Amino acid sequence: MKNLILFSLLIPCFYLSQFKTVTFSDLEIVQKDHPKPVIIHLYTDWCSVCKIEKYNLSRDKDWTERINKDFYFINFEAEKTKNEIHFQGKEFKYLPNGNSGIHELALALSKNKNQPVYPLWIILDKKQNLVYYHEGQFTPKQMKETLAKITGDSGQQPQELSQ
């Protein structure tokens, strides 16, 4: 009986959509062949808002498919990614600090150079120019509105949403 209950609780998880992700190292290659805007999502594994956000965004299958079709999506774990990253002509390394640390790229992408706010959403156009920056929770509704503006589904320019 316990197994049946546990199984029934896990079933909804199998139906969640997933974003197709690329890495920073793959981005340069895929942009040459098929340029698209880029969504960079900086998060940490300890951030509860990041986890809730990921779950909420993945629940909308149609929207996930649209992001996968129209954007490149980079999921960047700012405090656990330790490999050297080449991005926009520069090299970025992991900066250890005792048992933890942070990646230089997370600091470079963040407006707060001492400690980024998580989650952090950065949207670049096809030429990797910044078109949108958002610190903190980004609801599916806010994301849909912002990405619609960026892709030209409405006549308005994207603006940073109030937090």
Image (cartoon, rainbow, N blue to C red):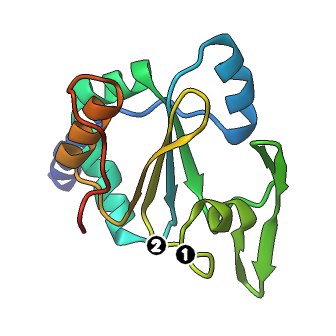
Which secondary structure, mark 2? loop
Labels 2, 1: front one: 1
Image spot of residue 7 (x, y percent): 23, 44
Image spot of residue 106 (x, y percent): 63, 63
Residue at (46% x, 27% y) in the render: 71
Residue at (74% x, 22% y) in the render: 29
Under mark 1, the amino acid is Asn
Q: Say which quadrant the C terminus sits in.
A: bottom left
Mark 1 residue crowding within 10 angstroms, few (<14) / some (14–19) / many (20+): few
Q: Is residue 37 left or right of residue 144?
A: right
The residue tagged 2 is 117
Under mark 2, the amino acid is Val
Residue 81 image-quadrant placement: bottom right
62, above or below 121, in the image: above
The residue tagged 1 is 112
Which secondary structure, mark 1? loop
Image spot of residue 113 (x, y percent): 62, 76
Residue at (71% x, 77% y) in the render: 101
Q: CA distance from mark 2 to mark 1?
A: 7 Å
Image spot of residue 74 (x, y percent): 55, 41
Mark 2 residue crowding within 10 angstroms, few (<14) / some (14–19) / many (20+): some
Q: Are marks 2 and 1 in contact (CB under 8 Å)?
A: yes
The answer to whether residue 50 shows anywhere in this view is: yes
Number of numbered markers: 2
* Between discs 2 and 1, the one toward the N terminus: 1
Label at residue 33: none
Q: Is residue 105 left or right of residue 95?
A: left
